[in-house]
Amino acid sequence: MEIIVEKEHQNPLLRRKEIRFRLEYDAQTPSRSDVRKKLAGLFSANVDNVIIEYIRPEFGKPEAKCYAKIYDSPEDLKSIEAKHIIRRNIGETGEEREGTKEES
């Protein structure tokens, strides 16, 4: 798996770095967690501060167009990002799922 950064933008207002990149891979499309780890290593960031907004595979090619955000802190991430995007990237524990069912 190889990451090719196409555009990088520092957003000081939201305290994050926004990255558009192309992902090249050999077999199947890599999981979000694998891409998050690779991107965190590439930008020397904490994996918990990385959010993959989307991974869009190209038809017939072993590559995908992607968009990610790297926040300065986990608190910024939780206060700015939508809950479903956080769940999609980080997941939730069984206790959190049970807590949301009880509230509804």
Image (cartoon, helix red, strand yellow):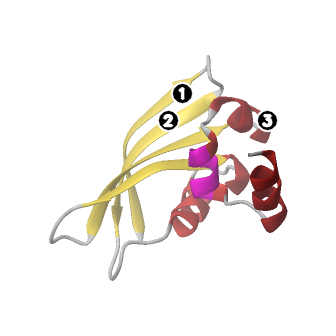
Residue 55: x %, y % from top left: 38, 56
Query: Residue at coordinates 58% horizontally, 66% vertically from top-left?
Result: 33
Residue at mark 3: 75
Secondary structure at badge 2 equals strand
Kind of residue indicated by mark 2: Glu
User: Helix, strand or loop at disc 3?
Assistant: helix
Question: Is the magenta region chiefly helix, strand or loop?
Answer: helix
Which range is magenta? Answer: 84-89
Q: Nearer the viewer, residue 35 or 1?
A: 35
Residue type at mark 3 is Glu
Q: Which mark is residue 64?
A: none
Q: Residues within 10 Å of mark 3 (few under 14, many from 20)?
A: few
CB atoms of marks 2 and 3 within 8 Å:
no
Residue at 57% across / 56% down in the picture? 88
Label located before the other in sequence (2 or 3): 2
Q: Is residue 86 left or right of residue 99?
A: left
Residue labelled with disc 2: 18
> Which quarter of the picture shows residue 96?
bottom right
